[in-house]
Structure formats: structure tokens, C-alpha cells
Image (cartoon, helix red, strand yellow):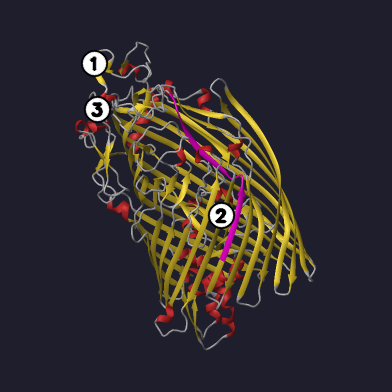
Amino acid sequence: MQQFTRLKRMRVVVLGGTILAMLAPAIAHAEDTEGQDIVVNGQRLSAQRALEAKKSAVSVVEVISADDLGKIPDATVADALARVPGVSVIVNQETGEGQYVTVRGLSGTYNATFINGVRVAQTDPGSRDVSLNLLPPYGLAEIRVTKTLTPDQDGDAIGGTINFRTPTAFDFKDAKVMRAWLSGGFNSNARSAGEKAALYQGQFDIGGRFADDRFGIFLSANYGVSNGNSQETENDGEWEPYIWRKNSTETISQDNMHLPGIDLDYRRFEQTRWGGNLSFDYHGETTQLYLRGQYARADKVGTNDYTDYRNRKSARLTQVDPENTSLRQPEDMITGHDAKLGNIYGYTTGQIVDADGDGRITDADRKSQQYWSLNGRSGVWDPKIFQFARSFETQDVRQQLATVQIGGNSAFGRLKLTYDLSYSFGDQIQPGSYSVGYNCDACTYPLNATGLDWVSHDPRFPHPGMPAYAVNVERDPSLLPFDSASLSRWKQSDDRWAGKVDARYDLGGLIDHLQVGAKWMRSSRSYDSTPVWEGDFSGTPLDGKSLAASGLIQKEVRSILHGEYYYGAVMGRQAVISAITAAIAAQPGNRVTGTALLRDDKNARETIYAGYALANLKIGDIGVVAGARVEHRDTYNRFWSDDGAASGFDSTSRGYTLLLPSVTANWRPDGQHVVRAAVWTGYSPPEYGNLSSGQSITRDPATREVVSISRGNPDLKPARSTNLDLSAEWYPDAASMVSAATFYKHIDHFIFTNGNQINADTRQGTIEVTQPQNGKTADLYGIELNVIKQLRGLAPPFDGFGLEGNVTVQHSAADSGQAYREGRKMRFVNTPHLLYNAAITYQNDVVQMKLSYNYRGKYIEDLRDNAVDKWVQHNRSVDFHSRVTLSSRVAVDFDVANLLNDWRYYTTKGDNPSYQKDYMEPGRTFLLRTSVVF
């Protein structure tokens, strides 16, 4: 590098070679120094740069530098973001990787995500959230989380904004830069299970400036592959009360609930991520222009074998008076038996509904499908039959995200203009979901059979007590006849255009400057769901064969989750695909055709017009930004509507305008202290598809009975918030900081989706009805504490140690307006009340290490029936990073993620950990990385 050529008599030792080039501006003074030994510490300089960005910002921000991203073995940028105050991660249940983030207890739908200031395309089928598992923590200059907004920022961000900035040639001290990273490792779960376990990643950067530093170009490219094996136990069916429940809106007691069933999941996956970014820059005397481009793609090729132990609902007698609690149980009321009608009971027709009208109560009067002994208040938990099934599905998903931006800024004396035009494209595709199932479902069980009982030494691992007549079904696949097979695919895409212009006029007095701006953005989203085929294996060699004889079994897995369970047969991916492909060819009549291909298709277009004006005032050491933003949003939806009698495409249009005022103040009494205060407003718009007026009905393919109904709600209002923030920051030296922040948010009309099960006379016994709704109000408040301290001044080797830590304590209370919650407040969805991180760092001239601990408290993930919601239990992660600097240009890292082999996803029915819903372990990850600066 040119800098080393010029410093002929200076020995420069660079710690943290992966960021040498990006941190060169901080060592510019080295050119004027000769005859000295200078230790340039990359980690400390990285911390200094991030802290300086935080200190100089107008708003409350958190900045993650490029080197911070490389010091922890995070798989995605979501995992990296979880280490800053007030941010928590929502993991992908299949892989255990971070996928979404919440800011101050607000999920991604309440936040705005950018790359280089470009609002990125949204590719989740059912929300405005942005899937961040697409982006690896490589090739970035920094990540900035902004928690308080000013009028020049998009207003639809109640929690805050996240901006990923990629490097440019002007980020580097040297005119030319070239560097490379190469890493390799493995996943412990996959390796122990005998599955593919390798991980590897490579990245190459090159850039430079020329023509007297007027032009610059920078290019970064990365490619990586990771293999994994996640093992999970999850409940199959909601926990139910011991006493019969009337419906899904009746509040029930959580003191005595029972588990219908569990699934054991054995997932194998390989993820390939690749992409890069490119920037062209021109720096003239009064005008700077740029062209930015970014592309990221993630392909997951995965399979899930899942074994199902499930109590089944069966026909029950129905009480005439459902509130009567005095009836004896059916087995105690048997008075005789009829060869045709079954058992004869001593109930009267005034007590039990005489369904067949013969004046007697017999088994022929059993109609309602229930788990309970009677359909009424005298009924108690009493399953009679159960299902054991083995199923397989492919879980392939392809995601891609691209942004292109052209813009610049120009100065005309006191007037400064900033302008840009951008385009973002993203899609998420399931190219083909192949599924097949085999099960032993009640039909082969003896008369008067019993259901499953459950025992557990640990609530995370409920074990089924198998009835004597079925003890062999787990280990003998010849007992499992074919049940079903299918093929489907779907695609979600978003095209997003935006243009904006900002004008600033400097006055230099009490009003330092005035600023106005305008922005236009249009998003076009489409969702295409294609059920390709449903059928059996008629006409193929697998017709009529059990799982054992099918040829689909790849191997036997004898142990999962550290020996907690015997698993059994898992199927081969290619064997299943070949079998379904052959069945489709043999049964052309079973292809899905007609309106069924259109039923879940939808598209939407949204246009936003925004304008703002602000004034920046300087009053001694106090700076104030005051102004307002106006946003008008037009939304058009086209969707399939099915009301049971008629069906077809329909559309809705919706528009509204919001005024968003704000005041932000900063007091800087000296170079070490900053006090901030802000009062600002924000909003969160309804998801596009939720504004439809139609409904979609799902039917059982065999019986054509209604299974579920999904309805839109064109009357949804945007959620609106008033936000108060106060914070103080102290910077005792360039590499240390102590800060405290407190915040309060009041939200009106927050949006949630709740599924209610209504009783129905169907084989399943219920119909699931879901519809988005506006809640009433929610309040969130909390405090964030953050400390970064390098222990300088101590005697060696203790002067190499440093401490980092942050804690967020927050509280939320929301009124959903649901009558069955009886006015009781609940936690806001996706809002943990406790978050903290702690780390010990050490570094000297050759070695640097970091041992970090991340904790995220429990929170509600979904609102569920009977006010017993789905909770995500607390999660922790201990991670280790080390780096050895071999020379000024070469460094070697060794990292371990999830050092204690903890769970990544653990959910329960209600807050009580006894009622397990999902428990998943992804294993440890070991990684060795080499970085070279040329």
C-alpha cells in the first residue's frame, strides 16, 4: 500500500487487518511522523470512529462499525444488530439464524430499513417486515440504527430506522485498496448427526481513487455456503383446558391444561449466499455525484422430516344444557349395548341431545368432534384415539435483494441541494414444495382405544406414553400406510421506485439553516401461489405400499436433542421428488386447475407523497431541529375473493394523509458530553393485503369441509404514535462512553392479527378464522444504559483489557379491545422487557479477544385463542472471538458461536414454561478466518 511506501523509516504494526484500509483516515497524522514506532490499533480505532459518529449525530443513534461486524461470528446482520442497546432479534425457526429485529420492542413492520439511504423492497408475503437473513455481515462500512426521527426522515417508523452503508473509495486513506477474507468451519449439530456440516465464506474488495482524487470506484464481492441441522420438538395443536371450553373467545384457566400432540422435526439445510456492491463517485469543487449498486442473494435448499404424535378429536355426546356441570361421565352411564347403535347410556333426552331421534341416548347420538368426554361443561379431557405419522417436505427458499441509486449534492453559496433517484427490487420464492406423508390414523386401532398420555422430566421435552397396542409404530415403518402427497410453489416480489430532493439554506445566525424537501415512492408488490398437484401414488411402483416398502427411507436416526428422543426413519430428498414427479405424470387429471390456481394470488400498488420543512436553531451550546412532515399514502389492492357462494377477483383502494410534527434538541456543553431530548410523531401503515375486503376459504381436500377462513379488513387505520426521548452521553476519552436513555411511546390503533377457532360440526371440529384488527392503545416505555470502557493506564498486561455492556429495561401494556380479554392489558407483541449484552475484550500488539454474552427476555409472539397467547421464552448466547495479527497485512481469526450450545427458539402456550410449544437447537458454529490486505 502507498502509505507504507511513504513511511520508509517507520514501523507500523496494525492490529485488526480486516479494517486497515477503512480506518486509515484516523491515522493521517502518520505521514508527518518519522523515526518512530507507532502502534495503530484497529479495534480501538474502530470503536473511536463508531463513538464519534454517535456523538456527532443529531438523533439518538447506535453505530456498528465494519470491524465490530467481524468480531463476532454472527451468521446474519440481524444477529449483529441484537448486540446494540434496545434491539432484539427474532430468529428463523428452521435455521436458528436471526431473521428480523425489533427496535425498542417494536417489530420490523414498525421500522424502516434502508441500504445507503434507499428504502429496500419488502418480500415477506404477509407483512411489511424485511427479512435480514438475506444479508451476511460482510462487505459493509457500518450499520446505523436511528431511534428518534426528524422531519427529513420517512415517517412510517415508530420504532426507528436501520441503514446499511456500503463502502466507497473515499472511505479509505490510501488511493488504492485491495483486501480479501477467507473463512471455513463447521456446525456441530450437523457434524454429530453425520450430515453435511461445512461452512465457508470468501470476500474480495478492490477500489481506488484517481484524477487527483476527483473520481473513485469501489467493488466488493462475497460468496459463502453454510450447512446445518436443526432439531426441534413442537406441539401439534393448542394446549387445552381440562374442562370443556365453549369456544375460542372464552377465557380459560391456565392452571390445568393438556397437550394434544407434538411434532419432532429433523431439518437439514444448505444455504448459499452471494452478492456484492459497487460504487462510482465524483467529487468536484461544488458538486459530488455518485452511483451505488448492491445485490444480495440467499438460496436455501432444505428438507424437514417431521414425526407427529397427535391425539385426535372424536365424536362425542352433546349436552342439552351446555352449562350443566353435574352429569356423570359416559363410561359410568353405560346401561347396555346394541350391535347397531353401540353403547346404550342412562342419560335422559333432557340431558343429552338425541341426535337420531329414537328416544334413547346411544353411541349413534355422538356427533360433535371433541377431545372432551362430553360436549358441555360436564366434559373433561379424555382423548380416545391418536395418530402417528411420518412426513417429509422440502423447504427450499430463494431470496434476492437489489438496490440502485444515482444522486449527489451541489452547493450554490448558501444554498445546498441533495438529490437522488433509486430503485429496489426484491423477491422471495419457494420454487417447489414437495411433501409426502405416511400415517397410522385411528383406523387400525382397537375399539375403545385410548389416546396419548404425556410424561416429562423437562417441560421442553414432553414424551408420549404410547398405548400398548401401538408401542411398535415408532420403530416399524411397515405399520404406516400412505396418506397424502402434494407439490406447490409461491413467489412474492416487490418493485420500488423513489425520488427525493432536499434544499438547505444556511443563514448562520439564531436560525442556522432552513431545510425543505420532497419525496415520492411507489411500491408494486405481487404474490403468486400455485398449488400444482395433490394426489396419491396410483399408477406408480409405490401404489399401496407402506413407508417401509416405499423405497423413500434414506436412513434411521436413532437420537435427537442430545438423546432425548428416538427419531426413526428419515426420507431421501431426491427419492421423494422422483416419486411425486412420477405420480404427476401418471395422474394428469390430478393437477390443480381453474380457480384453485388463482385463489391466493394478489397484487398491490402503493404510492407515497411526502414533504417536510424544518429549521435548525443554534442557541449557544444548544441545537434545535423543529419542523413537520406530511405524508399522503394511496394503496390499491387486487385480490381473490371467495364468500362460499361466488368467487373472483376484486379490488379495494384506500388513501389517507398524516401530519407528523417533531422537535429535537441537543445540548453540547463541552467536547465530552451530549444531552438530547426529542418529541416526535410517527405511524405504521396497514399491510397492503390486509386492506382487502374479501375472504379466502381453505377446504379439506378429501371432505371439502371448511378448515379455515382468512378475511381482510378495508377499515384498518394506520397505527399512530407520540414519542418522547431523553438521553445523556459522556465520552471520557476517544474509545470510551457512558450513556443513559429513556423513552416513552403512546400508540393508537395498533394492528394485530388474531386467529379464533369456532366450533363446527366437521371432522376437525373447528374452523380457524383470522382477520387483522386495530387495537385500542398501547404504551411502551423504558431505559437503556450503555458502557464502553478501555482499561488504559493499568500495568501490563491489564492495560489490554476492555469492558462493554448495555442493558435495556422496558415495559409495555396494550389494550387489544377484544371482549374476552375483559379489559385486561397485555404485553405488546414482540416486546421483550429485558435485554442485555456484556463483553470482556483484550488486545495487545499481536492478539485480540472478545468473549460476549447476549440475553433477550421473553415476549409474546402471537395472540392466540382464549387469551392464552404464544410466548417466546428467554434466549441467551455466549460467543467467542479471537484474532492473531501475523503481520501488518495478515490476520487470522478463530470464532465460536453459541459456545454453550443453547437453544435458539423456545416458545410456550402462555407465559408458563410448563406448556411447551416449540424448542429448537441449532448447535455450535466453529469458524477460522484469514484476512489479507494487499
Which of 239 and 492 lies nearest the eye of the viewer? 239
Depth check: 542 or 278 in front? 542
Q: Which of pointers 2 and 3 lies earlier in the amino acid sequence? A: 3
Q: Secondary structure at mark 1?
A: strand
Give left or right: position of 220 versus 607: left
Q: Is residue 604 visible?
A: yes
- Could you say where residue 201 lies in the image, as x and y percent from the top left? 42, 58
Q: Are marks 2 and 3 in contact (CB under 8 Å)?
A: no
Q: Amino acid at mark 3?
A: Ala
CA distance separating discs 3 and 1: 17 Å
Name the front one of labels 1 and 2.
1
Q: Position of residue 905 (x, y in %)?
A: 40, 50
Q: Residue at x 58, y 34 (%)?
A: 712
Between residue 857 and residue 599, name the one nearer to us: 857
Q: Main secondary structure of the magenta part?
A: strand
Distance between the alpha carbons at the discs numbered 2 and 3: 51 Å
Label 1, label 2: how many angstroms apart (C-alpha)? 62 Å
Q: Amino acid at mark 1?
A: His
Residue on which disc 3 sits: 449
Q: Residue at x 47, y 81 (%)?
A: 792
Span shown in magenta: 741-760
Q: Amino acid at mark 2?
A: Leu
Quarter of the view holding residue 284: bottom right
Does residue 696 show up magenta in the picture?
no
Locate residue 899 relative to residue 34 in the image: left or right: left
The residue indicated by pointer 1 is: 337
Dot 2 falls on a residue whose secondary structure is strand
Dot 1 crowding, Cα within 10 Å, few <14, some 14–19, many 20+: few
Q: Are marks 3 and 1 in contact (CB under 8 Å)?
A: no
Residue at label 2?
Answer: 780
Q: Secondary structure at mark 3?
A: loop
